[in-house]
Image: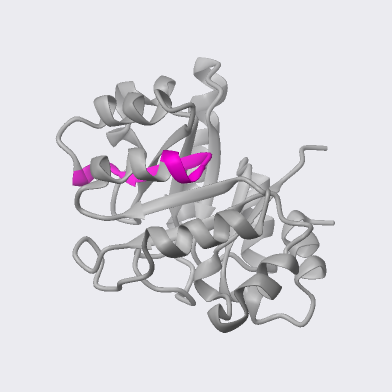
Amino acid sequence: MKHIQIAPSILSADFSHLADEISALKSADTIHLDIMDGHYVPNLSFGYPIVRCIRKLTDKPLDAHLMVTNPETYIEPLAKIGIQWISFHQDTVFHSHRLVHQIKSFGIKAGVALNPGTPVNTLGAILPDLDFVLVMSVNPGYSAQKFIPNAIDKVHELNAARDRDALNFLIEVDGGVTGETAEFLRAGGADILVSASYIFSSDDYSKTIEILRGN
């Protein structure tokens, strides 16, 4: 049985008790960082000082989702902090292939995020270069939004393309991921589930993470 990776999004954590919140995520596989600039999305989240703090609080891999208009300027600073995964939105750059390989040059896994209104076929020839694809199941910018069902179809489509072309990218899904929606995403071939409010509003983070895994 495939191990489903769970990546809690720290955006929904209680930042006044950040060390305790991260300590309670022992059963998580990675920590998801939603980095927003107030331009590409209307919300503004956190910058390098908070990312450095999170890096000091955990040995788990950090997964940075760049919801920013100039992602290329973030790569080297995040690499110096010690980020292991970075994804960006392809509509924020002219040359996504170049940025993917810039990320990879630092030994970081590179991914592209697909908004709900962006079809899978826009990835085209870049799919073989990607370590993962981040399927957005809500419109980016805020936590606790309602799950958009067409994400399930995208997961199926990506999984079929991966099998057909013998590719190795992972499928990550972010937005409205709950115990109920996770079941459909796992069945469709998703490998990594990002969850924010569903985990951080629960009484037992470890138990909730296992529910997302299907255990």
Q: Who is closer to the viewer here, 66 or 160? A: 66
Q: Is residue 5 above or below residue 183?
A: above
Q: Which residue ends up furthest to the top in the rendered image?
A: 166
Image quadrant holding the N terminus, namely top right
Could you tell me which residue is drawn at 54 percent across and 78 percent down? Answer: 15
Q: Is residue 94 above or below residue 5?
A: above
User: Which portion, as a residue range, is magenta?
Assistant: 79-92
* Magenta span includes 89: yes
Q: Which corner quadrant of the image does residue 34 belong to?
A: bottom left
Residue 128 in percent (x, y) is at 42, 20
Q: Is 148 displayed left or right of 212 in the figure?
A: left
Q: Which corner quadrant of the image does residue 166 belong to?
A: top right
Could you tell me which residue is drawn at 78 percent across and 64 percent down? Answer: 211
Image quadrant holding the C terminus, namely bottom right
Residue 72 in percent (x, y) is at 25, 40
Could you tell me which residue is drawn at 49 percent across and 77 percent down? Answer: 144
Residue 131 in percent (x, y) is at 49, 30
